[in-house]
Amino acid sequence: MNATVEAARAGEAGTGFAVVANEVGELAQEAAEATEDIAERVQAIQGDTTAAVTVIERTSCPRSAADLRTSVGRSTH
């Protein structure tokens, strides 16, 4: 905003500066939007990773000693 005011005060000489200041403002807005998009994607990945870890923990849990004794008993008889 200050850049726009200064460009206006400079008159004709400030026209190019105003264009550049406007472009910088637009780039800043795009960067802010991209940052929000990245944050949302990171959150989604973290959620998916947590879910995957939960599934892995549930499926690779060691069996109880009683289950192991039963399995060993079956395989030896």
Image (cartoon, grey):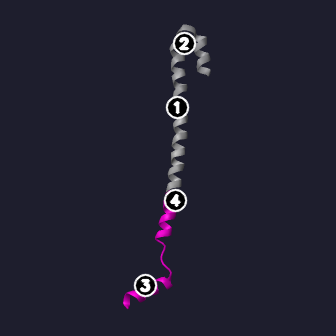
30 is higher (above) or lower (below) than 76: above
Q: How many marks?
A: 4
Q: Which mark is residue 69?
A: none
Q: Which mark is residue 14?
A: 2
Q: CA distance from mark 1 to mark 2?
A: 24 Å
Residue 58 placement (x, y as % from top left):
50, 69
- Local crowd at mark 1 within 10 Å, few (<14), some, or many (≥20)? few
Q: Secondary structure at mark 1?
A: helix
Residue 68 placement (x, y as % from top left):
46, 83
**Mark 3, residue position:** 71
Q: Amino acid at mark 1?
A: Glu
The residue at 52%/50% (across/down) is 44
Q: Which residues lie in the magenta part?
A: 49-77
Say whether disc 2 or disc 3 marks the residue closer to the N-terminus. 2
Relative side of 73 to 36, left or right: left
Is residue 51 found inside the magenta-colored segment of the image? yes
Say whether disc 3 or disc 4 marks the residue closer to the N-terminus. 4
Question: Image quadrant for the N terminus?
Answer: top right
Q: Amino acid at mark 4?
A: Ala
Residue 37 placement (x, y as % from top left):
52, 40
Residue 17 placement (x, y as % from top left):
52, 16
The residue at 49%/68% (across/down) is 57
Q: Nearer the viewer, mark 2 or mark 3?
A: 3
The dominant secondary structure in magenta is helix
Task: Tell me whether the residue at label 3 lies in contact with that at label 4, contact meaning CB atoms closer than 8 angstroms.
Answer: no
- Local crowd at mark 4 within 10 Å, few (<14), some, or many (≥20)? few
**Mark 1, residue position:** 30
**Mark 4, residue position:** 51
Task: Tell me whether the residue at label 2 lies in contact with that at label 4, contact meaning CB atoms closer than 8 angstroms.
Answer: no
